[in-house]
Image (cartoon, rainbow, N blue to C red):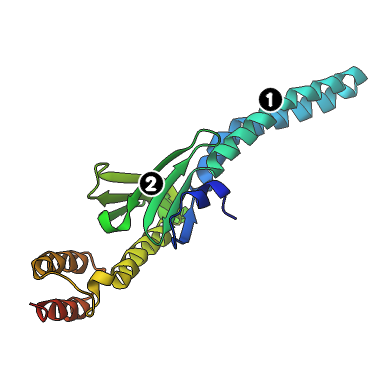
Amino acid sequence: MTSRYLHSLLGDNEKILLIARQHWFLLVSAILLEIVLTILILVGVTFALTLNPLAAFGYVLLLFPVSRGLYDFTTWWNVQYVVTSRRVINLAGVINKKVTDSSLEKVNDVKMEQSFFGRLFDYGDVEVLTASELGIDRFQKIGDPIRFKTAMLNAKEHMAHDDDSWRPDSPMRKDDIPAMIAELDQLRRQGILSEEEFATKKRELLGKI
């Protein structure tokens, strides 16, 4: 289920391909103290009730850890890493929203880091190196990072194939062809295009000179 706010960020014909969040370890670490306090209050008040019925008012103390736990959960839930058919979006905030995005066209490289425990519990850090002013977008402790990275690279590849500028029947200037070949070579070196695909596209472009 996606929020209206996220949908409001999308352009015409832009589709959401994947929504990822930080690993549930971060949520557990954030609410661990609240869980412990809730258990202690429940046990303490329940025991006190055997001595004095007025001790039931002690349950009011649960409001603090429960409300704090709900706040931490809402904060974690609203940190979203979104892959669309055009962009990678980093969305955070419950009321005050913070949005950063990078066009797939400007993604130059993707770096993923997983520790031993990251591989064991399926989380890691993903760095997206872009040609934009931001330079690097870092998504920390993301759950299922391999799926996120694969979805992003696949979206970039599909975007390159669907772009009219790569189609043989699309009008283009001869001056643009060397730059297009250079971009194709960059995709080949990143592993997005195979050697055969690169050679085919290159022949098509050179045939227009």
Up the image or down, 208 lies above or below 88; here it is below
Residue 117, above or below 206: above
Image coords of residue 37 (percent x, y)? 67, 28
Question: Which x, y percent locates residue 99?
Answer: 42, 41
Q: CA distance from mark 1 to mark 2?
A: 31 Å
Q: Are marks 1 and 2 in contact (CB under 8 Å)?
A: no
Residue 52 visible in the current orientation: no
Q: Quadrant of residue 178?
A: bottom left
Q: Amino acid at mark 2?
A: Phe
Considering depth in this image, is 47 or 190 the residue closer to the camera?
190
* Circle 2: element type: strand
How many badges with numbers are in the image? 2
Can you see residue 96? yes
User: What is the number of the mark on residue 139?
Assistant: 2
* Location of residue 174 in the rendering, given as x and y in whole percent from the top left corner: 9, 71
Relative to the observer, which residue lies in front, 57 or 46? Answer: 57
Residue 64 - label: 1
Q: Residues within 10 Å of mark 2 (few under 14, many from 20)?
A: some
Looking at numbered disc 1 in the image, what kind of residue is underneath it?
Phe
Sequence order check, earlier mark of 1 and 2: 1
Location of the C terminus by quadrant is bottom left
Q: Quadrant of the N terminus?
A: bottom right
